[in-house]
Amino acid sequence: MLKVGIIGASGYTGVELARILSTHPEVELTVATSRQYAGKSLSEVFPNLRKRVDLVCENLGPEELVERADFFFAAVPHKTAMDLVPVLLKAGKKVVDLSADFRIRDAAVYEEWYQPHSSPEFIAEAVYGLPELYRDQVKEARLTANPGCYPTSITLGLAPLLREGLIDPAHLIIDSKSGTSGAGRSAAVGTLFCEVTDGFRAYKVGGTHRHIPEIEQELSVLADTPVTISFTPHLLPISRGILSTMYAPLQEGTSEEAIQALYEKTYAAEPFVRVCPAGSFPATQHVRGSNCCDIGIKVDQRTGRIIVMSAIDNVAKGASGQAVQNMNLMNGFAETCGLMGAPFFP
Amino acid sequence: MLKVGIIGASGYTGVELARILSTHPEVELTVATSRQYAGKSLSEVFPNLRKRVDLVCENLGPEELVERADFFFAAVPHKTAMDLVPVLLKAGKKVVDLSADFRIRDAAVYEEWYQPHSSPEFIAEAVYGLPELYRDQVKEARLTANPGCYPTSITLGLAPLLREGLIDPAHLIIDSKSGTSGAGRSAAVGTLFCEVTDGFRAYKVGGTHRHIPEIEQELSVLADTPVTISFTPHLLPISRGILSTMYAPLQEGTSEEAIQALYEKTYAAEPFVRVCPAGSFPATQHVRGSNCCDIGIKVDQRTGRIIVMSAIDNVAKGASGQAVQNMNLMNGFAETCGLMGAPFFP
Amino acid sequence: MLKVGIIGASGYTGVELARILSTHPEVELTVATSRQYAGKSLSEVFPNLRKRVDLVCENLGPEELVERADFFFAAVPHKTAMDLVPVLLKAGKKVVDLSADFRIRDAAVYEEWYQPHSSPEFIAEAVYGLPELYRDQVKEARLTANPGCYPTSITLGLAPLLREGLIDPAHLIIDSKSGTSGAGRSAAVGTLFCEVTDGFRAYKVGGTHRHIPEIEQELSVLADTPVTISFTPHLLPISRGILSTMYAPLQEGTSEEAIQALYEKTYAAEPFVRVCPAGSFPATQHVRGSNCCDIGIKVDQRTGRIIVMSAIDNVAKGASGQAVQNMNLMNGFAETCGLMGAPFFP
Amino acid sequence: MLKVGIIGASGYTGVELARILSTHPEVELTVATSRQYAGKSLSEVFPNLRKRVDLVCENLGPEELVERADFFFAAVPHKTAMDLVPVLLKAGKKVVDLSADFRIRDAAVYEEWYQPHSSPEFIAEAVYGLPELYRDQVKEARLTANPGCYPTSITLGLAPLLREGLIDPAHLIIDSKSGTSGAGRSAAVGTLFCEVTDGFRAYKVGGTHRHIPEIEQELSVLADTPVTISFTPHLLPISRGILSTMYAPLQEGTSEEAIQALYEKTYAAEPFVRVCPAGSFPATQHVRGSNCCDIGIKVDQRTGRIIVMSAIDNVAKGASGQAVQNMNLMNGFAETCGLMGAPFFP
């Protein structure tokens, strides 16, 4: 049994990690940290874990942590992660970092969108943990940078088209909608129930969301040319779920049938990517609680554009589920171990 | 007091009309029809109307209806309206038609997207009932074609840019999200609570929604050139509200400040269109229950595109509120009469 | 025009007061205070008020306030109100206090459930502002203690039975459910969207909620004997609305028809209390956004108990709507002025 | 691998059975029936099952069914089940029946609340499938009558008190609230999204809900005396979840600590019943998607009553989860097999 620790267990990604790991046959959760809830049992903070996870939250520094587990999920905010992760690595531990700190390969780009990076020397060895694109590298990694939720939905949705050069990335419009769990568990007026329910709005409009450099990095790799996107995130009155609706001019003469076949072939062997049958489209309520990414496509004959829709559960495939998928790969477990539960509906 | 009738009172637009009219000082609601609920009081069908509206639903043909009121709201499905409305007009009544039957000026286009039109001779005199664009014509009309909900949000959102030629309509992407009341009150599995709540999805993807010809008609008038759009509607887990997010390349050298000023000037005197202050964006929960349309803009400097966001309550400004606004204009009442209630929040 | 001020305008009762007053023909809102948002326009804090309310939040003490209006709504927390209200009264102003500070007639009871009372001498003249019970007194009052939301729903629901001695109050069970707006607008983890949505739970179980002494006070007056209740509040994943389900043994030999007739007669002339027709029951979605209280009754023949259900909008009839109703009475306006809007549905 | 069939797979209990069974290591789902969707793949009806369940819905009679599996879940409406189940039993199959047809031991009581029973001879051998009460009998059963959702939450909540004679069942009040999935997946206006969301109401008030005889049957067994209850169900704007709030006079001199200890002892070894720590209470969002039943208690010192709150996921422990728990017991599998997933939150 691999001894596993969650650093920053009191957020929504923390509780989801604990939930998934509680039935994972290859690991034992041995430590969970939380500054705010130190001394409280994790199941007191998250009663859903009662009788399922039996751990007390601790407030531990990295030096103490390395004594307690062999594999770590860093579920702390960016900036905190960049100081913490190197200590773990130097102690010979493997890490999945759920923050943004090791996702951007170019430290200058990172620093433009975030802040100065204190451990740039570790960026190079970090593997971008999107297994559908970087499976082999993840297997060898000791540090995986777990992708952001929006980037996961977008990259998986566009990969087949960009790789084949079937769309013009200069006109790529990405309109994404996320459940409120993406905003985290901090007390804030803007995410109070009464402010969010029965409503809908955009935020960080106009090219300002910090996931943009990460998305552009991955799309550029796929397109083999620099890609600049228009990206607008919106806040949905749901807990979990992201749907990205993406528009791009399709190469002339390409049929919807050909695109549909391309997607089905690309993802046929992927356990977590599911291509919707022709004429049907993804819905967040059909991936909820699972590590699945559902993708649907449609060609608009009137405009020559293709519309790609991609749905994930932002807490699962967009964060903790994907993190466990990476952990599985990094430790030689079956990639799907602990993750094959079907989405629950209704 | 103007005697007013609602034809098709048992849908969501019907109950909203009855709600608004119940405190309207210039009118008396004298008849409400419903085939399904004939003989039941309207407040039995919609208990929110108890002690506020005291009418029994009746099943009446147009010949009987004309005896009962002098002004009519036709809140029946398209196709039904095209047969009904001419009878009312011929009897000297004025009508706001909430269906699509008289919105499309080109009967051939209508027939391409809907079905054969039985009363094409009445299309020419119908005024498209978007008062912010056609106020003077509405005042003179005896038949107003009340705009669709998506078209209302989109047309008001884009009018200033298109009129001034500031965007390239060839690359116009419109990503709209609507509350479930837009789907009507018919029993259907797809709009059951458990199918919609905590979820999100697109529908009628790829240029197939019937509001497209109506939107393109109005945008083309504004742009003074034929406009073809990419339009994707989505279903939100909320009752009321539409948010349209619109993307277009902005004419080079145009500043965000200039656009903001243009919008503020354009809509300064409009009682129902509210331009969000620079840097803030509309939200459906801030227009709920009102006849308001809130519009926000943002320029993405990285891509040279402008993003326009427009929010309405689809049942109010997107249907019944706008219908009453048109009724006011058609009868010489103050345009805002009965409609100045602020949106309720939370 | 009566000059009116809202003290504490940045909470949910504040914005609802501003919304209602914005179309009230007899008053002018001249001042709104908020410590937190001083200097910001109220419509920046609550964008639903844009183009409808044009006031800037100010941070003013009571001495400054009395220069700015002639009538005040005190929408501040209890304890703050007891210091503030006397200053306003001494300056000759009339006040509706929305806090609990002047609701409990026995200062000792107040102090047992809340804290020491700094202005007990004003308790005696405060009128409990439930117009359906104390209309004449409210008309003469210069200080009205606006009832709590739970007490409003419960007292109106049980009044006919208790007055007539038709139930045994010793076995009164009250199971209430409230929308989340009742928890206020303070940032707190417990009322975040993700903690509340798609969920349901009780809180302050076992006779600990501070509305209990207020409820028991009013029920005891009605029953003319001390009443002790079992009361359990619950948190609903809705914004607005309270439904109270109340159980009591019914006097033997009393028919459901007789009770139904009693309720209909009791509330026949009340504009805001609506008795559901026999066999139908209230729903929070049918009173939403209105000052209505809907009541339904049913006798359980198997157990000899009566079940009374009472629904209000906690922000309206449970707070700001009722406050305006009291203001109307205290100033000789029509009681229904500004409040006759039907509930909006859907 | 046990070959298992789901009869009536297109409802919410059907999809949940398929979801749970898709990762159950001891069984293979070999057949799923649906009259309405015959010929469609189950994952077309329920896209959450895509790539997880690979079966086509069939329209088969019982004679054909018995060739296709060795164990059956009958997820058909009552009345249909009473004709179907005997055929399966006679063919030597074991069955968990999710309908009400074999829950009521007294056929006369069944017929009073439902309709004539066509197979009363099978009632006697049916075991009431609440494993926490009838574990040993379930293990030996060939027919298990899976309990109703309300009865499960109520019976588990009250069992310790009734067995010990600590409450007076003559004054038992049960106020239950259920998510909308309990109403099933049939198209109906009353359960449309817009009718349910942002609302709350009671239904089947006054001793008329058909779960009453089932609840009273089980409570009477536990109390060893006939129990008659006041029971009011309510409809919550959530998909999954039941919370029952139960009130009864507590035997004098019994402390809250003693009751808390009694509950903890009673359920200590139960994998699916979780007693909330003293002072904390259950919430539906903390059992969602799991087979757990969370119970909390509180004594109201002012009234001498105890309040018991019990939360389940009505689709899981209230239906399909419990059905799989029974299947496990009937086939000698570990009782928890396939069911130990923690509730997901948020």
Image (spheres, coloured by chain):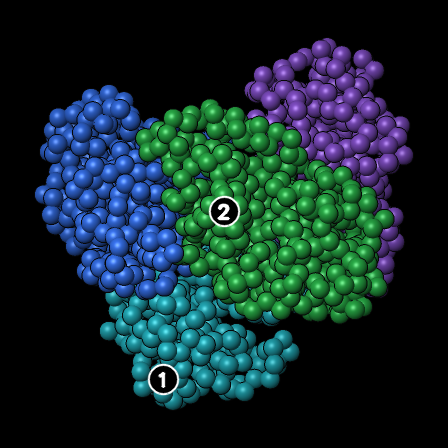
Chain colours: A green, B blue, C cyan, D purple
**Image: D163 above or below B120:** below
Q: Residue B207: horizontal and vertical position, in percent? A: 35, 32
Asked if residue A198 shows in the view, the reply is no
Residue that appears at 26% across and 43% down: B169
From the viewer's perspective, is the residue at label 1 or at label 2 nearer? 2
Q: Residue D122: horizontal and vertical position, in percent? A: 80, 20
Q: Residue A48: horizontal and vertical position, in percent? A: 71, 52
Depth check, front residue: D244 or A242: A242
At label 1, which amino acid type do we have? Answer: Leu
Circle 2 marks a residue in which chain? A
**Image side of residue B69 versus residue C168, left or right:** left
At label 2, which amino acid type do we have? Answer: Ser
Residue C60 lies in what quarter of the image? bottom left
Q: Badge 1 is on which residue?
A: C65
Q: Secondary structure at mark 2?
A: helix
Q: Badge 2 is on which residue?
A: A220
**Image side of residue D72 versus residue B151, left or right:** right
